[in-house]
Image (tube, coloured by chain):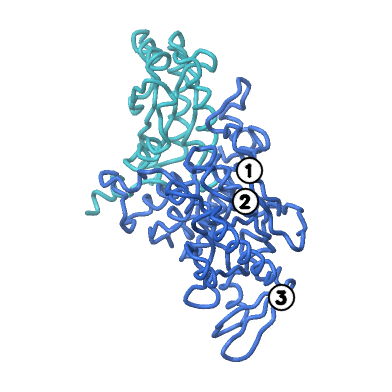
Chain colours: A cyan, B blue
Amino acid sequence: MSVEHESFKPTIVAFCCNWCSYAGADLAGSGRMQYPANVKIIKVPCSCRVNPTFVLRAFQRGADGVIMCGCHPGDCHYSTGNYYTRRRMTMLFDFLDFLGIERGRTRVEWVSAAEGARFASVMNDFVKNVTELGPNRKITDLRTKPEHKEGE
Amino acid sequence: MQKVAEIAQKRAIQLLNQGVVNRVIGWKKGEFGYDETPAVFTTAAGIEDFRYDVFSAPNLSKYLIDESKKEGKILAFLKPCDTYSFNQLIKEHRVNRDNVYIIGIECGGMADINTIRNRGAAGVTDVADNGQTVIAHTLYGDVTFDKNEVLLEKCQACKGKKHVIFDELIVVNPQDDEPKNRFAGVEAIENMTPEERFAFWREQLSKCIRCNACRNVCPACSCLQCVFDNPRSGVASKASPDTFEEQLYHIIRAFHVAGRCTDCGECSRVCPQDIPLHLLNRKFIKDMNAFYGEYKAGEDSETRPPLVNFSKDDAEPSVISDKGGDK
């Protein structure tokens, strides 16, 4: 069983805003900084474009962790978008915690276009935390989990 | 209560005859003596059916979205908590205030027929309100209850007896205006471990039959097109085949009314499966009060709700883990 646990590679969905975090991810790539390949990046125009349904859908379709990345507060390309994100996601993630879904599976981080190294370290840290939590079984469609696929 | 109902009835007839309003929305007797249903009266003779007692719990504000767009003025009887919903709807430009004549009506708390039944009154035929006590007439004789013991959940956590919007008031016995602690239930769950919380909600939400009653009754759920009616969403108007869909429905619904929910408690009242849905809404209210300052949705019709507002020094999302979330 322990072998199985060690081989667990979480699926991470990262919502990155077009202007800061996505460029930060780009910089991490061109700077050859290592971060796990199981982070799947979804580019959004602004972090406040992310509807809570997106986060839940990601979990439904098999994500083990969801991370939201946006510009630092005050640096939003659209001036105020990430201030709304900050309130919304504080509320949503605390609410998921209230429903018993581990707080470690969700995170909000501010990553600017110049912070390639920070992007890589945030992702490394987040993947490590989610790996420790194990597969997400609380808020998901269990049919997306490999062992269930094999069963059918 | 009897007296309040009589005054309300007389006043409604008066306003109809004077031509101030051309119809009245209130409550009438349902099939039994304990299921008063909302009704629109258009004639003075019809108002004979008007009932206002401990079972007139339905919040009439939501009906005014449609009713206020029709021709002529409508008279609406609103209880204190209903006036909060109405104010919130004005803020969202969903009702036409000019077309509604509001009479704020005294409320001494509404009774829950299920509690009365569970406390040993079988075969209830009718219920009479006696101020401090409630007398259930049953097939096997009368049973008397202390009113405070059989109140609806939303009335046990009453947020005050003040009407926040009205054209005139009918208050015979001014009620104690002390707001009660609404967050005890939320705190109890917060103090559980994540596993216990998950088990609690798993048990509650798995009872959901997706009848959509909570959505349909909710004054904050007034979108013209609802995401859950979208046939391509995969969650439209059907029983939920897996646990995820139950979670999705309730999380999204609670999130969507967050900051706009006046905590009128109708969702829990109408739930045929007795899911404590008010706890979801109150969790959001409690969090918003803690992070973004005290805010009571519907207290006025101008201020911006917390989730469509921000300040530059808001708490970072990591506060939740810092204050002792599980990770």
The disc, 1 or 2, on the residue closer to the chain's N-terminal end is 2
The residue singled out by tag 1 in the image is B286
Calculate the distance from the C-alpha at mark 1 to the C-alpha at mark 2.
8 Å
Residue B307 is left or right of residue B157, and the answer is left
Residue drawn at 54 percent across, 59 percent down: B16
Q: Are marks 3 and 1 on the same chain?
A: yes
The residue singled out by tag 3 in the image is B130
Are dots 2 and 3 in contact, CB under 8 Å? Answer: no
In the image, A138 versus A16, the foreground residue is: A16
The disc, 2 or 3, on the residue closer to the chain's N-terminal end is 3
Q: Amino acid at mark 3?
A: Asn
**Crowd around label 3: few <14 · some 14–19 · many ≥20 (10 Å):** some
Question: How many discs mark residues in the rendered view?
Answer: 3
Q: Amino acid at mark 1?
A: Lys
Q: What residue occupies the far left of the structure in this picture?
A: A152
Q: What residue occupies the far bottom of the structure in this picture?
A: B140
Residue B300 is left or right of residue A130, and the answer is right
**Crowd around label 2: few <14 · some 14–19 · many ≥20 (10 Å):** some
Residue B288: quarter of image = top right
